Amino acid sequence: MWLWPYGRWGGFDGIGRAAKRIEELGFDSITVSDHTVCPTGPEGDGLMPDWPDWAVTSAYLSTITTRLRIVACVAIPYRSPLVTAKQVATIDDLSRGRLTLAACVGWWEREFDMLNVPYARRGAVMDEYLEAMRVMWTEERPRFDGEFVSLCDLVFEPRCYQRPHVPIWIAGGAGRKSLERLWRVGDGWMPMGDDRPALLGETIARIKDGAEQRGRDSRRLSFRYTIGLGEAESALGLLSSAIAGANGGIVADEPSSTASFAGNADQVVDAIHQYAEAGFTELAINPSGRSYAACMERVEWFAAEVLPLLEAGLRDVRCGSPDRPA
């Protein structure tokens, strides 16, 4: 389950109760997102004002759950790779190997300006930072010399609990640079935006082919899609469109949004089947609602009415575990 927008949960007490409950219901992962500030005016459409720190939130979730995988969508260029690598490794150690890093390039230009990060070069910054982080996670005496970061004469501990390091999913669009990044360092793809299974399936096929051509086993890659549960909310659609547009979305000539499903359980399952057939191996939900009660009502319904049908007919689709879809 994707937690964003955060404000509807009523603070960390509500977030904690939701996390514990979805673990009880059999879901396999919970997703957090990353922004430092929220703009005012039209630029803020879809963002919502509440953005607790991704690392603090992930660490909190890891201490109140025992099984849930924590998927952290992190804007890699925002922070020194030493800081991000330390946060990721510490949380992975704290959670005993339950963290997945969904690496994002970022998309809001003013936020880059405020963080003193070159927006136009964010892709190059991200590529170098990811390489430096992998060096810190895997080498006894990390050494790295790049344009944006250099490392030497240091010890980096603790390293990730998972070996060689946490899974790295590449989140965002399907532009050439994004796919090259995935083929080089990614363990999975998490598109943000676009609700057309057929077109997404074409991209998944291209990713698999490219991985095999580069000597990688495409069967080891994860493909994760997030669906809206309930009536479509303008905030989710606006945010998905903004991210896809800024990061080389699958299409550029029309708006792109995240799919939202409402209806009876059979209709929702039929819709989810389309994404499974497209090649997605993991599905996450983002329940609509402006309060804890409204969101959890949809989650409880999904667990009671949809999960049993998915277990019967979609055994190859999972969310963090091979045993149960979510």
Image (tube, rainbow, N blue to C red):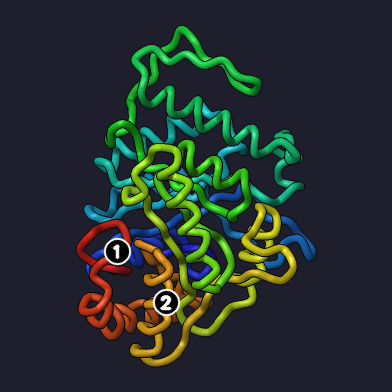
Figure quadrant of residue 45: bottom right
Q: Is residue 206 left or right of residue 96?
A: right
Q: Is residue 229 left or right of residue 164?
A: right
10 Å crowding of disc 1: few (<14), some (14-19), many (20+): many
Q: Is residue 42 left or right of residue 192?
A: right
Picture coordinates of residue 55, whole percent (x, y) = 45, 43
State the SS at label 1.
loop
Dot 1 amino acid type: Arg
| Residue at mark 2 | 274
State the SS at label 2.
helix
Residue 90: which numbered mark, if any? none
10 Å crowding of disc 2: few (<14), some (14-19), many (20+): some
Q: CA distance from mark 1 to mark 2?
A: 14 Å
Picture coordinates of residue 216, whole percent (x, y) = 38, 40
Q: Residue at x 46, y 66 (%)?
A: 226
Q: Is residue 197 left or right of residue 243?
A: left
Picture coordinates of residue 251, whole percent (x, y) = 67, 64
Dot 2 amino acid type: Gln
Q: Is residue 84 above or below residue 62?
A: above
Viewer-side residue, 313 vs 299 = 313
- State yes or no: discs 1 and 2 in contact (Cβ < 8 Å): no
Residue at the bottom extreme of this rendering: 264
Looking at the rendering, in which quadrant would you find the C terminus?
bottom left
Q: Residue at x 23, y 60 (%)?
A: 322
| Residue at mark 1 | 318
Mark found first going from the N terminus, 1 or 2: 2
Residue at the front extreme of this rendering: 213
Q: Is residue 317 above or below residue 297?
A: above
Q: Residue at x 49, y 10 (%)?
A: 152
Q: Residue at x 78, y 65 (%)?
A: 42
Asked if residue 103 can be seen in this view, the reply is yes
Asked if residue 14 can be seen in this view, the reply is no
